[in-house]
């Protein structure tokens, strides 16, 4: 079961964007921690079970193959203050989201449904169906 927070586990193109994101946030005065990158099918299944057939609160509506993390094109982050994760710091999340967008990433803080301040992705215009069919970023 793999639930990685290593940038190197992302698709190479997304890894470059993720590293640039971390550097640009730092330049803007915000340290960020990457909390999730690649998640394999077993790990996604366990996450999906949470709040359904397993204890805990529901954390995702994505089954295996339905999360962009399963295809190595998404990462989650959290702003840090003095080394501590600031999960409720909407202002810093938003500033980081704007930085992500300036680099060409999609920031889930803009999404109308399943809005997620911590989530960024780069799909290159591909859909989940494309990835499921074996396509990937060039
Ligand atoms: Zn995510």
Image (cartoon, grey):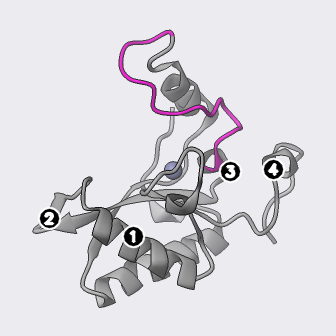
The location of residue 33, given as percent across then percent down, is: 31, 63
Callout 1–callout 3 Cβ contact below 8 Å? no
Q: Is residue 100 covered in magenta?
A: no
Label 3 secondary element: helix
Q: Residues within 10 Å of mark 3 (few under 14, many from 20)?
A: many
Q: State the extent of the magenta-drawn residues as a range.
A: 53-68
Residue located beneath label 1 in the image? 94
Residue located beneath label 4 in the image? 131
State how far apart marks 4 and 2 are (Cα). 36 Å
State how far apart marks 4 and 1 are (Cα). 29 Å
Q: Determine the residue positioned at 56% across, 71% down.
A: 15
Residue 71: mark: 3
Label 4 secondary element: helix
Q: Earlier in the sequence, mark 1 or mark 3?
A: 3
View extreme (front): residue: 112
View extreme (top): residue: 53
């Amino acid at each position: 079961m793999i639930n990685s927070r290593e940038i190197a586990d992302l698709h190479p193109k997304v890894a470059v964007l993720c590293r640039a994101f971390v550097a640009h946030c730092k330049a803007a005065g915000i340290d960020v921690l990457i909390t999730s990158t690649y998640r394999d099918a077993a790990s996604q299944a366990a996450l999906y079970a949470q709040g359904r057939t397993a204890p805990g609160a529901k954390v995702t509506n994505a089954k295996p193959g339905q999360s962009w993390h399963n295809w190595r094109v998404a990462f989650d982050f959290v702003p840090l203050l003095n080394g501590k994760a600031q999960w409720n710091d909407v202002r810093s999340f938003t500033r980081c989201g704007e930085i992500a967008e300036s680099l060409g990433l999609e920031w889930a803080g803009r999404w109308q449904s399943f809005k997620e301040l911590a989530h960024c992705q780069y799909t290159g215009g591909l859909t989940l169906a494309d990835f499921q069919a074996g396509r990937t970023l060039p």
